[in-house]
């Protein structure tokens, strides 16, 4: 049986270019960028735990990373011209 997949927003505010680049490299393997420091990730609870552990292991000292779970039964409200989702699925705009 396949586990339940949820949509998550990962946002960060990090001062150091070096630390920010490490976070970007990590997140590229997990989701797609919505804005400069905002990513959309689709995974289950075990996956988001692995991502949180990997982010924690980076030892960020000049800012923080926040992970927010989106309600999976809510349709997004899109205003304006939507950009193409490289994953081909639903994209949530906040």
Image: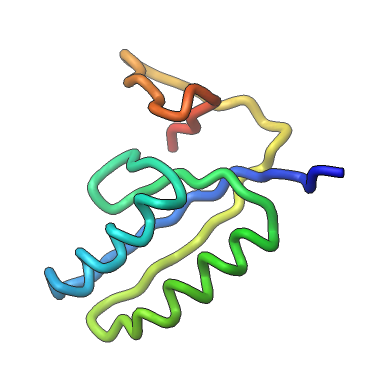
Quadrant assignment, res 15: bottom left
Residue 11, by quadrant, is: bottom left
Nearer the observer, 79 or 63: 63
Residue visible at 46% across and 29% down in the picture: 87
Residue at 62% x, 59% y: name it.
Answer: 47
Circle count: 0
In the picture as drawn, the residue positioned furthest to the left comes out as 17
Residue 2 lies, with reference to residue 82, above or below; the image says below
Left or right, 17 with reference to 66: left
Q: Quadrant of the C terminus?
A: top left
Given the current orientation, which residue lies at the most extreme top position?
81
User: Does residue 10 sit above or below 60 in this rendering?
Assistant: above
Residue 19 screen position, x and y as percent: 22, 74
Q: Nearer the viewer, residue 37 or 87?
A: 87
**Please, which residue is most extreme toward the right here?**
1
Above or below, 65 against 91 in this view is: below
Residue at horizontal 32 percent and vertical 21 percent from the top: 83
* Residue 81, position as x, y percentages in the image: 31, 13
What percent of the width, then of the height, locates residue 62? 23, 81
Q: Is residue 62 left or right of residue 76?
A: left
* Quadrant location, the N terminus: top right
Where, by quadrant of the figure, is residue 49 drawn?
bottom right
**As drawn, 1 above or below 66:** above
Which colour scheme appears in the figure? rainbow
């Amino acid at each position: 049986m396949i586990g339940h997949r949820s949509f998550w927003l990962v946002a960060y505010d990090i001062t150091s270019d070096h630390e920010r680049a490490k976070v970007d490299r990590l997140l590229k393997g997990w989701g797609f960028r919505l804005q400069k420091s905002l990513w959309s990730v689709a995974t289950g609870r075990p996956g988001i735990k692995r991502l949180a552990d990997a982010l924690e292991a980076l030892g960020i000292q000049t800012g923080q990373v926040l992970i927010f779970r989106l309600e999976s039964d809510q349709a997004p409200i899109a205003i304006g011209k939507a950009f193409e989702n490289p994953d081909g699925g639903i994209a949530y705009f906040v």
